[in-house]
Image (cartoon, grey):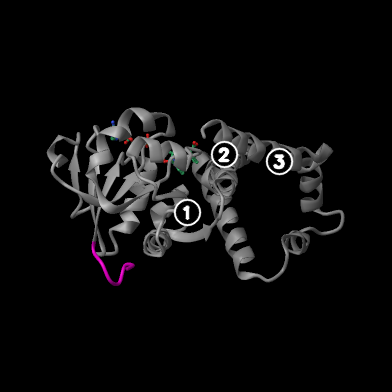
Amino acid sequence: MNFKTKHYQALMIGCGKMGGALLRQWIRSEAVHYTVVDPTLPELPNGVVGYDNADALKSKKFDIIIIAIKPQMVETILPDYANLLSEDGFVISMAAGCSAERLQTALKTRAIIRIMPNLPSFIGKGVAGLYASPECSEAQKAVSLDMMELAGTAVKVDSEDGLDRITAIAGSGPGYVFEFARTYVEAAESLGFSREQARALVLGTIVGTIEMAMDSDDDLETLRNNVTSKKGTTEAGLKALNADMGLSQKLKQTVDAAYNRAIELR
Ligand SMILES: NC(=O)C1=CN([C@@H]2O[C@H](COP(=O)(O)OP(=O)(O)OC[C@H]3O[C@@H](n4cnc5c(N)ncnc54)[C@H](O)[C@@H]3O)[C@@H](O)[C@H]2O)C=CC1
Ligand SMILES: O=C(O)[C@@H]1CCC=N1
């Protein structure tokens, strides 16, 4: 009972940046039909019906309820939706940190899939984690994995803690990378390039470098060494970048802080 054998009715609660990015890819499969509730009535892909509240849905039942609101809103918003889940239905939540137990209490159901997507899902290049509570059926796990693979790649984890660790690396990761790119562009501007030139130079360099690494069997240290001539410019730049272990310490602090925040949100 996966994409190939059943049609599903799904209700997405909240459809902002992350929910919207996933929906854009998920609608590429006709196996799931999507309805959205979001008070801001965001623009939705063709074929998706949107409501600004759940009043019109009171007599409906859904096979999947997708949680795309903030983790802090779970207890106030979700209890109103508990009756909309069909008897053999399940929940997919992207709310960072928010434990399956909190969702089980709010929606009065045991079958919870927690996902941790990231924003490049918008272009089908997401990296996601997926955790299923023990009460989920094989079919529910298979459908959720199919959905995540429509938006990129997915890694299954067997604990919620594992998902919180993926949050610190991949869920929040695009934020770190955008910030790295932003400050790199600032540095390029300080060497005299216009904002537009600096952006093209930096993003082009990042994309080319990452695509080369993805295509290569060499480890990252070897690839880095291929750029770095003895007593050359890259060596001088890297010495400054790594001075006092600054970069590795900062990155360790970054992922630890994000992981600790996920723990606080449980
Ligand atoms: N933005 C990201 O990169 C990622 C976000 N997430 C998770 O996705 C969830 C959503 O985050 P974003 O999309 O970034 O936030 P967002 O603020 O863009 O989206 C939240 C949406 O919930 C809607 N909403 C508010 N009250 C509502 C209600 N009563 N009923 C229905 N909808 C309501 C808002 O109008 C908004 O469109 C969060 O739980 C976050 O942890 C997970 C991974 C990555
Ligand atoms: O910042 C957040 O809490 C969410 C989860 C991962 C990315 N954005």
Q: Is mark 1 within 8 Å of ligand 1?
A: no
At label 3, which amino acid type do we have?
Lys
The span shown in magenta is: 1-7
Q: Earlier in the sequence, mark 1 or mark 3?
A: 1
| Main secondary-structure element of the magenta-colored stretch | loop
Q: Earlier in the sequence, mark 1 or mark 2?
A: 1
Q: Is mark 3 within 8 Å of ligand 2?
A: no
> Dot 1 lies on which element?
loop
Q: Which residue is mark 2?
A: 179
Structural distance between the alpha carbons of marks 1 and 3 = 32 Å
Q: Residue at x 39, y 58 (%)?
A: 144
Q: Which residue is mark 1?
A: 134
Residue 57 rendering spot, x and y as whole percentages: 15, 41
Q: Residue furthest right?
A: 231
* The label number, if any, that marks residue 252 in the structure image: 3
Asked whether 4 falls inside the magenta stretch, the response is yes
Can the viewer see residue 43? no
Do the CB atoms of the residues marked 1 and 3 lie less than 8 Å apart? Answer: no
At label 1, which amino acid type do we have?
Pro
Q: Residue at x 45, y 52 (%)?
A: 120
- Quadrant in which ligand 1 is drawn: top left
Residue 92 rendering spot, x and y as whole percentages: 38, 49
Q: Is residue 196 above or below residue 55?
A: below
Q: Residue at x 45, y 50 (%)?
A: 115
Q: Residue at x 26, y 38 (%)?
A: 81
Structural distance between the alpha carbons of marks 1 and 2 = 38 Å
> Dot 2 lies on which element?
helix
